Amino acid sequence: MEKLIAFKSSKEKSSLYAKAEAVVLFLCRECVDHIRSLSLPEEIFELIAWQAEKQGYGFTETGSVTSLLVKDENGYQRVILAGIGAGKECTPGHFRFAAGNAVRELRKNKIKDVVVAAPILTNPKRGHYLKAVAEGLLLGSYEFNKYKTGGDTKTEISGGNDNNEKTNKINSATSRNETETTNNAEKISVTIFSEVANAEEIVAEAEKICAAICHARDLANEPGNVMYPEALAQEAVKTAKKFALEAEVLPVKEMQKLGMNAILAVGSGSVREPKMIALKYAHGGDKPFIAFVGKGITFDSGGVSIKPSDGMGEMKDDMTGAAAVLGAMEAIAALQLNVNVIGILSCAENMPSGSAQRPGDIVRAASGKTIEVVNTDAEGRMVLADAVWYACRKGAAKVIDIATLTGAVIIALGEHTSGIVSNDDELAAEIQKAGHRAGEEWWRLPIVEEAEELIRSSCADVKNSAGRPAGTITGGVFIGSFVDKGIPWAHLDIGGTSTAKKTEGHIPEGCTAFGTATLIELARTF
């Protein structure tokens, strides 16, 4: 993602308002009474007062976008009112959501130069709100249009300086693709006014985080004929070189030597060989290593237990867990966090063929534990079985795996909250708190007493599917059984949140890269 930092400056804040094509105001119901703090041109104050008197305060409702025109001495200027809500709804998450809606309104109206303001950003202690606005603008402008003629639209978001008023500048691409086509790019220069302490650093950090999230989105949005295990391994190595990470890619022969028969069984039906990828970031001194382990099924047909054809094309995103791990490792390195982190991407393509694994097969995983293959469509937990074992061999003191593992998590938690299954109360709580700060919600599911019994096999140590009852929990417990005893572990199921059916706020239709932001925020706590 291209980074072009350039700051504007002006002695008069009002002069920047006058020069901009548009003004975006983030307003909750209570903020309307405090907009005088923004030193807006009088005609904008009058417009808002008229809107409130004649139309009510609907323009402050959560997620609402009201686009108006105001006449000034230079002609007409567009004023966009982005609603935050009222009372307890005035959260960073709602600002992030509103910013995503606002930036698409700007693009729809082909605005190239805009000033953004909010009363809450005049408070020096509200850096987390500034970060949320910047993230919302960047993530909301994302589109995966690499394969459209004239695609790969690029957006720049910039900021300026006004005496003691601190402003920020972001420049970013809406989609970072291999081609990096920019000839037809539409650019938006956004000046964000704030009096937040360390504003420039906060915005620069948001830019790095969003670049990593958009990278993860790009990878998971790629079709299966483009993004397969070898291609994902190449992308991981490329990212490692760019961000000074150590990288290791295990080919089939190395995995065979290590006894990684679980991942090899999943990949046995495809002409694309599976890959086990390990990335290492060691800037934490004597701190213990934490492992992020991602499921990387680049296409999931279900194997011999083949899926219905309707919706099968969506299974190109079954590697979102691996994409989230790669994105997190990128951001951790870009932010130069003082941590030690290992990223494992366990990648395979699950296809039916004469060489594919069959229901009823028994395979021995790298840990030595045997697995009865009940359902070849329960493949993610098998590639993760070898991956979490490998993370322990790499010296991980804690293991967090992330996967589009089950449809059962959608039944339990819907499409906006992801599930946690963990053997450690403290780790699970840290993940939930990190997710909340990052704008991603998680809910911990209990490890019920009968979970281990449900995955026990009559002819092997464990079976890879226990059926529908407690499906998310048993899938997680299966993976956890391959983690070394005594090591804190958490399984993150993003089966319901990895993909969005429609664009809302800062969440785009298609791959969301849910979990990437949580892993980045979690790394700060290590």
Image (cartoon, grey):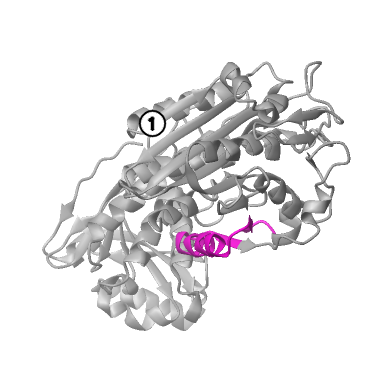
Which residue lies at the image location 65% right of the left edge and 42% below the top edge? 482
Q: For mark 1, give the secondary structure.
A: strand
Q: Nearer the viewer, residue 288 or 71?
A: 288
Magenta extent? 414-442
Which residue lies at the image location 25% right of the left edge and 55% below the top edge? 201
Q: Nearer the viewer, residue 62 or 352?
A: 352
Please name the residue that numbered disc 1 is placed on: 246
Q: Residues within 10 Å of mark 1 (few under 14, many from 20)?
A: some
Which corner quadrant holds the N terminus? top left
- Image coordinates for residue 231, horizontal then vertical, percent: 53, 23
Looking at the picture, does residue 3 appear above or below residue 516? above
- Image coordinates for residue 293, horizontal then vertical, percent: 55, 41
Left or right of 130, for residue 7: left
Which residue lies at the image location 48% right of the left edge and 66% below the top edge? 94
Looking at the picture, does residue 372 appear above or below residue 199? above
Left or right of 228, for residue 197: left
- Image coordinates for residue 323, horizontal then vertical, percent: 53, 38
Q: Nearer the viewer, residue 59 or 54?
A: 59
- Residue 37 appearing in the image: yes
Left or right of 390, for residue 437: left
Q: Is residue 436 magenta?
A: yes
Which residue lies at the image location 83% right of the left edge and 47% below the top edge? 466
Q: Is residue 205 magenta?
A: no
Amino acid type of the residue that numbered disc 1 sits on in the rendered structure: Glu
Looking at the picture, does residue 466 appear above or below residue 298? below
Which corner quadrant holds the C terminus? bottom left
